[in-house]
Amino acid sequence: MTSATPAELHNLESLATRCGVSPEQLLPELYQSLRRMAHQQLQGEREGHSLNTTALVHEAWMKLAASYPELAFDSERDFLALSGHLMRRVLIDHARHGSRLKRGADQVQVTLTDRYEAPIDQTESDQLLALDLALEKLSELDPRQVQIVELRYFAGFSISETAELLGSSPTSVKREWTLARAWLVAHLQDPP
């Protein structure tokens, strides 16, 4: 990772205090958690792909440092949730760089499972871009459902972990996850 700025160090110290560990213990734990998340997101990636686990972690870290330098986290889960969102942004940027989603082109079929699997080819990159556009539209209707999709699909959290992070019941999260998936499937099959 890149060197942390004084504000980032303060935020890590603050987070470490909240977690009951020293910053020296917390940083390696966070880094390993980020690597696990990135590895999970990149499973199934074709051999020799330009974005590997380390690159995804580092790009997400740089986005975090650049976009949220003063942000303090209440818990490790909050940090990981935001990191999962930023990894999504990195993957979307990477897919956009590698392909161009044509406006008005044929419909793109996206299968929304319980976790994100990185694009293997051009078609899957197009699917990721279509999903991102659909998530942007869903965020206008229900930002919480987008949070649930990001936590479940991109960050790899379980229903119970997502519920804990959002301060909700697993039943509510499962219901909203189901509704979000249904909305996304309908939107992706018949875009406006």
Image: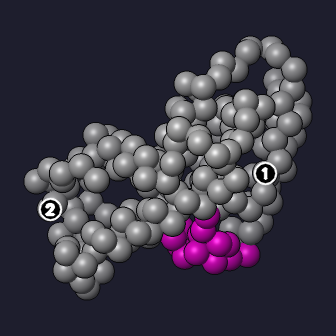
Can the viewer see residue 82?
no
Q: Quadrant of residue 184?
A: top right
Badge 2 crowding class, 10 Å Cα cut-off, few under 14, some 14 to 19, many 20 or more, is: some
Residue at mark 2 to residue at mark 1: CA–CA distance:
38 Å
Residue at the spot of label 1: 112
> In this picture, which residue range is highlighted in magenta?
156-171
Residue found at x 58% / y 75%: 161
Picture coordinates of residue 37, whole percent (x, y): 53, 62
Q: Amino acid at mark 2?
A: His
Badge 1 crowding class, 10 Å Cα cut-off, few under 14, some 14 to 19, many 20 or more, is: some
Mark toward the start of the polypeptide (2 vs 1): 2
Main structural element of the magenta stretch: helix, strand or loop? helix
Picture coordinates of residue 159, whole percent (x, y): 67, 72
Q: Are marks 2 and 1 in contact (CB under 8 Å)?
A: no
Residue at the spot of label 2: 10
Tag count: 2
Q: Amino acid at mark 1?
A: Leu
